[in-house]
Amino acid sequence: MPVYLDYNATTPLSAVASDALLPWLGRPANPMSLHRWGRAAAMAIDHARAQVAEAMNWHREGVLFTSGATEANATVLSTGRWAVSAIEHPSVAVHGALFLPANAQGICLPEHAPDLSGMDGVSIMLANNETGVVQPISEWSAFCRARGLRLHVDAAQGPGKVSCKTDADFMTISAHKFGGPQGVGALLYRQAPPILLAGGPQERSRRAGTHNVAGIVGMGAAAAAITLQQPELRDRLESALIAQGGRVAGAGAERLPNTLCIGFDGIDAQDLVIALDLAGIGISAGSACSSGSPKPSTVLKAMQFPGSAVRFSLGQGTTAAEIDETIQATTRILGQLRYID
Ligand code: PLP
């Protein structure tokens, strides 16, 4: 049986989310309509908004549904000047007016920030998608508050892996990272965000366009079912691969319990990803977004991590047998690749 270990790229739709959303695919559900079908859809969206708010420790009036984290990030960051960490996902990095350095462990610390005069806000991710390194959000929050700067947190990799409780001004999430459907996410806000799409009155006129009712319902159900993953299986994989000469990116830092980003001297990450795929094991080299390209990962570069690295990211459904199979296959393939070299 193939083994999927790329949950940071996307997770399968959970049974709870699938059960909740499927009926909505067959209904005429426009929540802006005043009749019973419309009212039922509006109530379903309200319910999902409450589920997302509760799971994220947010107030429900501050939950704006979008098509995903990319759109939520763009909504906040498209106005004003933002200092962003050097390890952000491309959907944030593209809006950076200034970059904040990360240390060798992949942590972006406020004490290393350059002069931020002229900036309107700071954007720091909750946890990095490639290394899993969790960022010091409460320190950034204090830093921003003391300077009158807004704080945006891309929390796409947080739900189901780490506590997402912050007092940031804005936070973004994406349903398919925690068992919800693809193409739906949310911007969580405390201060009114800019208008992303003008037109109809949806989402308090901030994001016009008919709601993705089924997607939103699925996202709410997935959010309500969130439980935190445990690190045991990742740790077992990590110890076994360190014994094979692996070097962990972000070693010693607080990391997501499901993520292992690891490099091996003399082994090209792409070669390892391809060989593991042929063996039936799905992982990625750096992030999914950059894994199709031979360019080195900007995250690993920012950390001055030598060489390339692969990312194993485990999910709720990952079993001990799958991890044992992954350890055996990786060990065998490393031997073959080293022999070829
Ligand atoms: N931010 C982070 C940290 C991510 O890992 C991702 C997805 O890989 C995104 C944003 C973008 O999410 P989406 O593609 O669902 O918009």
Image (tube, grey):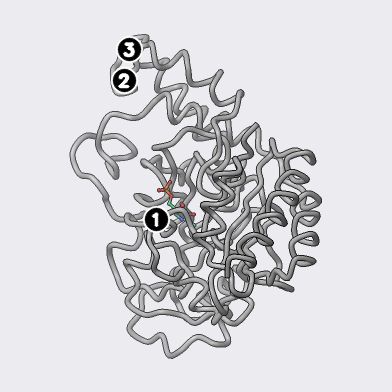
Q: Quadrant of the N terminus?
A: top right
Q: Position of residue 290 (x, y in %)?
A: 41, 60
As measured in the structure, the alpha-carbon distance from the residue carrying label 1 to the one carrying label 2 is 38 Å
Q: Position of residue 239 (x, y in %)?
A: 80, 62
The verdict on label 3 being within 8 Å of ligand 1 is no
Judge the density around disc 3: few (<14), some (14-19), many (≥20) Cα neighbours within 10 Å.
few
Residue 26 marker: none
Q: Residue at x 57, y 45 (%)?
A: 282
**What number of labels is visible?**
3
- Determine whether the residue tagged by mark 2 lies in a helix, strand or loop: loop
Q: Residue at x 40, y 44 (%)?
A: 68
Judge the density around disc 2: few (<14), some (14-19), many (≥20) Cα neighbours within 10 Å.
some
As measured in the structure, the alpha-carbon distance from the residue carrying label 3 to the one carrying label 1 is 39 Å
- Determine whether the residue tagged by mark 3 lies in a helix, strand or loop: loop
Residue underneath mark 1? 292
Which mark sits nearer the N-terminus, 3 or 1?
3
Q: Position of residue 127 (x, y in %)?
A: 58, 61
As measured in the structure, the alpha-carbon distance from the residue carrying label 2 to the one carrying label 3 is 6 Å
Residue underneath mark 2? 30
The verdict on label 2 being within 8 Å of ligand 1 is no
- Determine whether the residue tagged by mark 1 lies in a helix, strand or loop: loop
Inspect the image, locate mark 1, and give the three-letter code of the amino acid beneath it: Gly
Residue, far bottom: 115
Residue underneath mark 3? 28
Inspect the image, locate mark 2, and give the three-letter code of the amino acid beneath it: Asn
